[in-house]
Image (tube, helix red, strand yellow):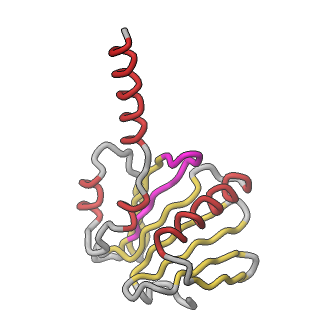
């Protein structure tokens, strides 16, 4: 009986650990991948696609305790990735603030303590300054918070 209970506990922990979104893996996804290659990395996710005259974005919803998150990748018309982002999945001010607080801590651990804090038109922005190939920022405005990792120079004014 004890062995079955121990095994069941291990199994439940393993399933939760696998289902949990991994921020390190997300940050390390190669910016050279196409949208098809990104989708192949996460075959079990339910992808949404939006197209425009400037390219397309693909996204799916996931979970990072305690927040529902939306994971997105943006591509130009040649299907070259320009940026990837994680935002709060539930759109309300409380969820956005929780996400911002959680990802500020994650960002400090992943990208270091060298950052600039700005407030532009009511949007709180943290810009990490120590990456030579990527622009990394965390934003908060009203019911939306977003962690953005973009190719250097893709985002104007930072």
Asked if the stretch drawn in magenta spans residue 43, the answer is no
Rendering coords of residue 85 (x, y %): 47, 66
Q: Describe residue 132's horizontal placement relative to residue 96 as left or right.
A: left
Rendered position, 10 above or below 68: above
- For the point 37% across and 34% down, the residue is 15
Determine the image quadrant of residue 96.
Answer: bottom right
Give the main secondary structure, helix, strand or loop, of the magenta stretch. strand
Q: Which residues are magenta?
A: 63-74
Residue furthest to the front in view is 2
Looking at the picture, tell me which residue is in the foreground, 42 or 136: 136
Q: How many marks?
A: 0
Q: Is residue 46 above or below residue 35?
A: above
Is 152 above or below relative to 59?
below
Q: What x and y, as percent, mark residue 3?
A: 33, 15
Q: Name the quadrant of the N terminus.
A: top left
Where's residue 14, x and y in %? 36, 35
Across and down, in percent, residue 89 comes to 57, 51
| Quadrant showing the C terminus | bottom right
Q: Tell me which residue sits at (39%, 67%) in the image.
A: 27
Q: Residue at x 58, y 48 (%)?
A: 67
Query: What is the quadrant of residue 78 in the picture?
Result: bottom left
Residue located at (26% from left, 68% from top):
34
Q: Looking at the image, which residue sits at the far top? A: 1
Q: Is residue 106 left or right of residue 56?
A: right
């Amino acid at each position: 009986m004890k062995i079955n209970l121990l095994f069941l506990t291990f199994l439940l922990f393993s399933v939760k650990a696998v289902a949990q979104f991994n921020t390190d893996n997300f940050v390390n996804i190669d910016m050279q991948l196409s949208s098809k290659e990104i989708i192949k990395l996460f075959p079990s996710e339910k992808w949404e696609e939006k197209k425009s005259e400037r390219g397309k974005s693909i996204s799916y919803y996931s979970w990072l305790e305690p927040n529902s998150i939306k994971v997105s990748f943006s591509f130009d018309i040649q299907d070259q990735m320009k940026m990837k982002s994680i935002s709060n999945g539930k759109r309300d001010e409380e969820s956005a603030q929780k996400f911002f607080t959680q990802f500020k801590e994650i960002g400090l651990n992943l990208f270091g303590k060298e950052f600039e804090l700005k407030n532009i038109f009511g949007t709180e922005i943290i810009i990490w300054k120590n990456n030579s190939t990527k622009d990394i920022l965390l934003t908060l405005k009203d019911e939306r918070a977003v962690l953005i990792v973009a190719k250097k120079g893709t985002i104007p004014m930072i």
